[in-house]
Image (cartoon, rainbow, N blue to C red):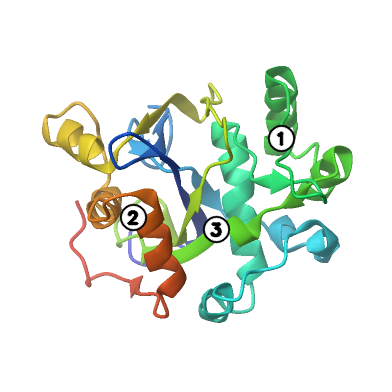
Amino acid sequence: MNASTEIRPAATLILARPAVESFELMMLKRTTKAAFASGMYVFPGGKIDASDSDPALAPYVSEPRDHQHAQIAALGEDWLGAYVAAIRETFEEAGILLAKHPDGSWVTLPAKTIAETRQSLHQGELSMVDLCQAYDARLSIDELNFYNRWTTPPGRPRRFDTRFFVGQAPPMALGIEDGEETTDAVWITPLKALEEHQAGRFDLMSVTVKQLSAVAEYENLEALKTALSDQDTFPHYRPPDYLPS
């Protein structure tokens, strides 16, 4: 594959929850049949679809927080599509929905409903607008912080320009693999993930190692969230800015 491979816009969510030691991140093992990141542990994410920017979604997304305006400006014209894609992919791949009711309470769904809805969404039988209407939901873009961007190096079978977000998981969110694209779902601290990778038990892409190493610098989730809310520059790492694995 040469450097002319199409670079697809994508969004990934580094989803965190508080833990006794530091904080934990939701990580998913990609099926060995996958064309991209086969058999590796990744954060939930995927390609930004045209439907993620559907104007009909406008009434079903939360208002951005003040500090997010710098993030939106950095993301550019399709900022909404990036936020929505991160939320959609997290629901499809991990079964975790970052959405609230108009009264501010989190949307919670029975396990069977989650399984059926995420499958219908993945197969295109259901849209995000449909989902929001069905469950009186507002997508919680205000809970996500744009962090940085990474472009896949040349020579890979698929290349992405990925917008990475960081967000806190809803209370009681479990996370479960979909059994198709993902075969395992774990909550793991950044340091533990890096240790397991170093020991050869937890396969990671180089970009994932770099992201884990960066967030591992923070003592707890509140420190990470504070740093993200203060961030006003959003680096875009392109080859050869970093070395591919």
Would you say the residues marked 3 and 2 are in contact, meaning their CB atoms lie under 8 Å apart? Answer: no
Secondary structure state at the residue bearing disc 3: strand
Q: Residue 215 is drawn in which quadrant?
A: bottom left
Q: Amino acid at mark 2?
A: Met
Q: Which residue is mark 2?
A: 1
Q: Amino acid at mark 1?
A: Gln
Q: Is residue 109 left or right of residue 148?
A: right
Image quadrant containing the N terminus? bottom left
List x then y, in percent, for residue 165: 47, 58
Task: Pick whichever, 206 or 35, lies toward us.
Answer: 206
Mark 3 against mark 2, which lies toward the viewer? 3
Q: Is residue 201 left or right of residue 235?
A: left
Q: Which residue is mark 1?
A: 123
- The span from disc 3 to disc 2 (Cα, nearest Å) is 34 Å
Q: Is residue 162 left or right of residue 104?
A: left
Q: Dot 3, how many residues are within 10 Å of its Cα: few (below 14), some (14-19), or many (20+)?
A: many
Give the residue furthest to the left: 199
Q: Earlier in the sequence, mark 1 or mark 3?
A: 1
Q: Which residue is mark 3?
A: 144
- The span from disc 1 to disc 3 (Cα, nearest Å) is 25 Å
Q: Earlier in the sequence, mark 3 or mark 2?
A: 2
Determine the residue positioned at 26% across, 51% down. Answer: 219
Would you say the residues marked 1 and 3 are in contact, meaning their CB atoms lie under 8 Å apart? Answer: no
20 vs 59: above or below: above
- The span from disc 1 to disc 2 (Cα, nearest Å) is 28 Å
Q: Residue 28 is drawn in which quadrant?
A: top left
Q: Earlier in the sequence, mark 1 or mark 2?
A: 2
Determine the residue positioned at 66% across, 69% down. Answer: 64
185 vs 83: above or below: above
204 vs 155: above or below: above
